[in-house]
Amino acid sequence: MSDKTSKLTPSSLAALMCARICHDLVSPIGALGAALEVLNDESNADMHEDAMDLVRTSAGQASNKLKFLRLAFGAGTSAPGMLGMGQLETLVQDMYGAGKASIRFETSLTEVEKTQGRLLLNLVMVALQSIPRGGELVIELTKKADASIYNLTAKGPKARIYEEFQRSLTGRAPEDGFDGRTIQPFYAGMLVRELGGRIDSSLNDEEARFMVFLPSKQAQNAA
């Protein structure tokens, strides 16, 4: 297969991204529906309190995922703007804070450009999938005069970088084509390329690292 960047039609990209969103939301929405069925069954009155707990939990999970995915995959508006680091950290912790991996931000930045913020959320998604058994994700963001550098280090037992994810990040189609899982790293890589940057990944024992270099607009104009 060619190593050239794969091209997707807008309709194919939209369909695959919708598949990814549905994949992330099906679990809490399904649990919410099951809980409502129990509440509607008067013969299960003794289970109503447990069902209400499930409603609250599932509704919260669905809300947190929608907020995260809305920003990660949707511009909200085409106007340029900035995103506060506090907002991004809250979205990440609400989405993944109850999972198997602990997440720590290390940065002095207080805000990032909107597209870079969307990229950061997508990089978090990619990095966490490299430690399926849990562990720790450290997110380091630095900004220099000529570039912004994002380092995401995921440590955990059986850390891995799936080959199809590696191909997708660099803009190449997986051997079996894109699906709802692999379209997300492809989208992350697409954002990197749109920003004129590059992304590198490496795996060392139980540590997966993702580094993104994003040149400043001044540096791009001078090139």
Image: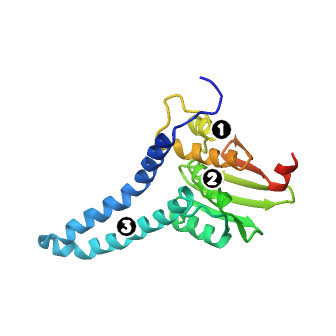
- The residue under label 3 is 58
Q: Residue furthest left?
A: 43
Q: CA distance from mark 3 to mark 2?
A: 25 Å
- Residue found at x 64% / y 33%: 5
Considering depth in this image, is 158 or 191 the residue closer to the camera? 191
- The earlier-in-sequence mark between 3 and 1 is 3
Mark number displayed over residue 123: 2
Give the structural element (helix, strand or loop) at label 1. Answer: loop
Q: At label 3, which amino acid type do we have?
A: Ser
Name the quarter where the C terminus is drawn. Answer: top right
Considering depth in this image, is 78 or 61 the residue closer to the camera? 78
Q: Residues within 10 Å of mark 1 (few under 14, many from 20)?
A: many
- Residue found at x 17% / y 71%: 40
Q: CA distance from mark 1 to mark 2?
A: 13 Å
Tell which tag, 3 or 2, sits nearer the viewer. 2
Q: Residue 93 location in percent, x, y?
A: 57, 67
- The earlier-in-sequence mark between 1 and 2 is 2
Q: Is residue 180 above or below residue 102?
A: above
Q: Residue 122 location in percent, x, y?
A: 59, 53
Circles 1 and 2, Cβ within 8 Å, touching? The answer is: no
Give the structural element (helix, strand or loop) at label 2. Answer: helix
Q: Residue 150 location in percent, x, y?
A: 73, 55
Q: Residues within 10 Å of mark 2 (few under 14, many from 20)?
A: many
Q: Is residue 17 above or below residue 54?
A: above
- The residue under label 1 is 170
- Residue found at x 42% / y 70%: 60
Q: CA distance from mark 3 to mark 1?
A: 35 Å
